[in-house]
Amino acid sequence: MGEARAGMLLVATPVLLDPNFADTVVLLLDVDENGALGVVLNRPSVVPVAEVLEGWSEVVAEPEVLFHGGPVSTEGALAVASLSRPDDVPVGFREVWGTLGVVDLDTPVELIDGSIDGMRIFAGYAGWGADQLDGEIEEGSWYVVPAEGSDVFRLDPTDLWRDVLRRQPGELAWHSTRPVDPDLN
């Protein structure tokens, strides 16, 4: 497993029973000595983006709904996007990893449109204080694995947890086939 840093995925282990994070895949957007911040990739809501953020539904990837990014600041929104061309960075875009970055939703949509391949908007985020995430990883709550660009903008994120584990090397891939209740096995 890799080290927790921006652009990596946190995949919830069976040990993690917190309903906010059970069976989730979290994309880390920022990790430093003060803590970490990420968004849950596999929890779409039923709320259309157009209902909450007028104009942004034009540039978000399907499904055009808000995603539950995590339990922190759920009244706020955070946007993650992928650049069309690495040499064409629009105003309001901050690189996180490769062509993936965060978009300032106060930026006029016209300045972003045409510069990005895909975008997701998340209500809330997942956050950890200094050393908190390291402690959760050490206790076995998270697998830390590399992200692929397609993880963020999947049309149907339902099987993302299993698919991310399935592509991992060695025994980690075996976890993708575990039943919901191992006692029934």
Image (tube, grey):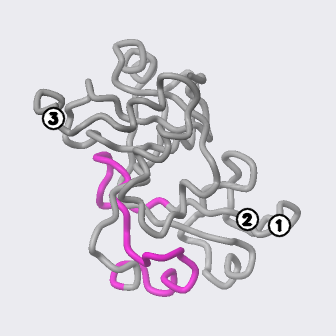
State yes or no: discs 1 and 2 in contact (Cβ < 8 Å). yes
**Element carrying mark 2:** strand
Q: Quadrant of the C terminus?
A: top left
Q: Quadrant of residue 5?
A: top right
**Circle 3 residue:** 181
Please state which of residues 156 and 174 is positioned toward the viewer in this rendering: 174
Please state which of residues 87 and 11 is positioned toward the viewer in this rendering: 11
Q: Against 153, is 5 above or below? A: above
Magenta part of the protein: which range? 51-78
162 with respect to 89 (left or right): left
21 with respect to 60 (left or right): left
**Circle 2 residue:** 83
State yes or no: discs 3 and 1 in contact (Cβ < 8 Å). no
Q: Amino acid at mark 3?
A: Asp
Number of marks drawn: 3
Q: Quadrant of residue 111?
A: bottom right
Q: Amino acid at mark 2?
A: Leu
**Res. 85 mark:** 1
Q: Amino acid at mark 1?
A: Arg
Of callouts 3 and 2, the N-terminal one: 2
Q: Is the residue marked by circle 3 packed among few (<14), some (14-19), or many (20+) residues within 10 Å?
A: few
**Element carrying mark 1:** loop
**Element carrying mark 3:** loop
Taking the spot 34% from the left edge, 29% from the top edge, the residue there is: 13
Give how far apart the Cα atoms at labels 3 and 1 are. Answer: 44 Å
